[in-house]
Amino acid sequence: MLLLTALGTLAQVRAAADELDRHDPSPADAVSWFEEKPGKFRLEVYVPTKQDGISVEAIVGAAAPELHLKTKKVAAKDWVAMSLEGLPAVRAGRFIVAGAHALRNEVGGRTKIWIEASEAFGTGHHGTTWGCLMALESVLRQRRVERVLDVGAGSGVLAIAAAKTGADALAIEIDARAAAIAEINTKQNKVANRVRVIAGDGARYIAGQQFDLVFANILMRPLIKLSPKLVPVVAPGGTLILSGLLQAQAPLVREAYANRGMQLVKQIPKEAWMTLVWKKPD
């Protein structure tokens, strides 16, 4: 596996990352960017083959020709941990998400969520996970949440966050390895009695059920495709939190759910990403 990196301005790095995210299928296994120091941003792109690296160079070169990519080999099994190693704790409202090393030094009244870097998506650092946590914070300021569904649970961070506020959660993750990691995370966070993790599509587990809060942090196309299944499982007066989409993709998702009677109550942008918060009419 190869890691391609470049340093540049915010505009340059965002342009390159956005262009890579628009490609479907993408030559990249993962794309991330962050501020390395004031005014200087780093782009990191992981690719499985040299040919994919050449494709990434062409895409980045067209979107931001000022960026100069550097390439190095990394062990395939280590790429996620490398990309997240040493990341600081993430604060989102009342929640703080981090690995054990960072949580150890945290004091104060925030709700701690212990998530280590792994191949399961969801450490809180990504704009979509942060947006979902902030959306949960907004809901909790208005009412108590009791039954939660997390579709595409990844590391289980969202279900765990809800469980730590007293909710019972059903976390569905199609990837068996990620589901196993989510199971471990529920135990480490001492909420295994409140979070049920399902590996697979989970359709039969939610049929006929309703939840007062539903998360779906996946991708634009699955969000649109799943709208006929997700809307019915939101209880009247309940909340649906959607993410995993770029800001430019939000209008299509808004249309799909507005056409099914959902009311958009909030949009939470973060970097290139957007989280949509919906209410189902009583």
Image (cartoon, rainbow, N blue to C red):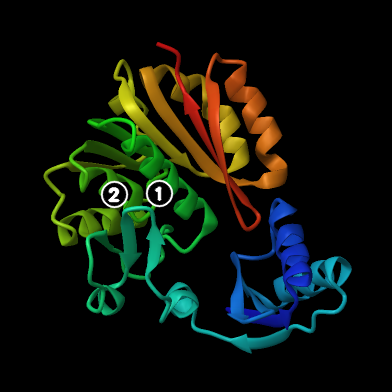
Q: Is residue 281 above or below residue 133?
A: above
Instruction: Tell me where residue 28 appears, x and y as whole percent.
Output: 65, 65
Amino acid under disc 1 = Leu
Q: Is residue 91 above or below residue 137?
A: below
Amino acid under disc 2 = Ala
Circle 2 packing at 10 Å, graded few (<14), some (14-19), many (20+), is many
| Corner quadrant of residue 6 | bottom right
Q: Secondary structure at mark 1?
A: helix
Instruction: Tell me where residue 220 appears, x and y as whole percent.
Output: 61, 40
Instruction: Tell me where residue 231 appears, x and y as whole percent.
Output: 46, 21
- On the rendered image, what quadrant is the N terminus found in? bottom right
The mark found on residue 97 in the picture is: none
Q: Secondary structure at mark 2?
A: helix
- Looking at the image, which residue is at 46% across and 80% down? 82
| Corner quadrant of residue 222 | top right
The reply to whether residue 92 is visible in this rendering is yes
The reply to whether residue 2 is visible in this rendering is no
The mark found on residue 133 in the picture is: 1
- Looking at the image, which residue is at 35% across and 30% down? 213
**First of labels 2, 1 by sequence position:** 1
- Looking at the image, which residue is at 67% across and 81% down? 5
**Contact, mark 2 vs mark 1 (Cβ under 8 Å):** yes
- Front one among 67 and 70: 67
Residue that carries the numbered disc 2 in the rendered image: 161
| Left or right of 175, for residue 183 | left
